[in-house]
Image: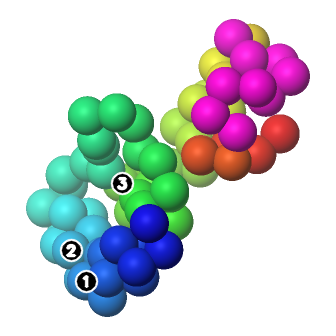
Amino acid sequence: MADFVAKCELVSKDIFAIVERYKGSVSAEHGVGLVKKPYLQYTRSAVEINYMRSLKLVFDPKGVMNPGKVFDL
């Protein structure tokens, strides 16, 4: 897994800069996950990310679902 993440990091910044320029979005079939986590702010405002974090707290107040994936509690 670490090898995969390292390879993704080689191109991710460039890819997400293009996504941001064309007003695309960071998404994934199974969630943002670890690879796209550092790039969420490219297409979501701080307010949107805070809303996402707030929803996570409502449905998972103890942080047991997908710990460390997007929002560390």
Of pointers 2 and 3, the one earlier in the residue sequence: 2
Q: Nearer the viewer's eye, disc 3 or disc 1? A: 1
Colour logic:
rainbow
Asked where in the image residue 18 lies, by quadrant, the reply is: bottom left
Quadrant of the drawing holding the N terminus: bottom left
Q: Position of residue 21 (x, y in %)?
A: 19, 69
Label pair 2/3, CB-CB below 8 angstroms: no
Q: Which residue is mark 2?
A: 15
Q: Nearer the viewer's eye, disc 1 or disc 2? A: 1
Graded by Cα atoms within 10 Å as few (under 14), some (14 to 19) or many (20 or more), the crowding at tag 1 reads few
Q: What type is the residue that disc 1 sits on?
A: Val
Q: Position of residue 39 (x, y in %)?
A: 43, 64
Disc 2 is placed on an element classified as helix
Graded by Cα atoms within 10 Å as few (under 14), some (14 to 19) or many (20 or more), the crowding at tag 3 reads many
Q: Which residues are magenta?
A: 59-67
Determine the residue positioned at 64% across, 19% down. Answer: 55
Q: Which residue is mark 3?
A: 43
Q: Position of residue 46 (x, y in %)?
A: 59, 49
Can residue 26 be seen from the camera position used here? Answer: yes
Of pointers 3 and 1, the one earlier in the residue sequence: 1
Q: Which residue is mark 1?
A: 11
Determine the residue positioned at 35% across, 72% down. Answer: 4
Give the side of residue 26 with respect to residue 64, left or right: left
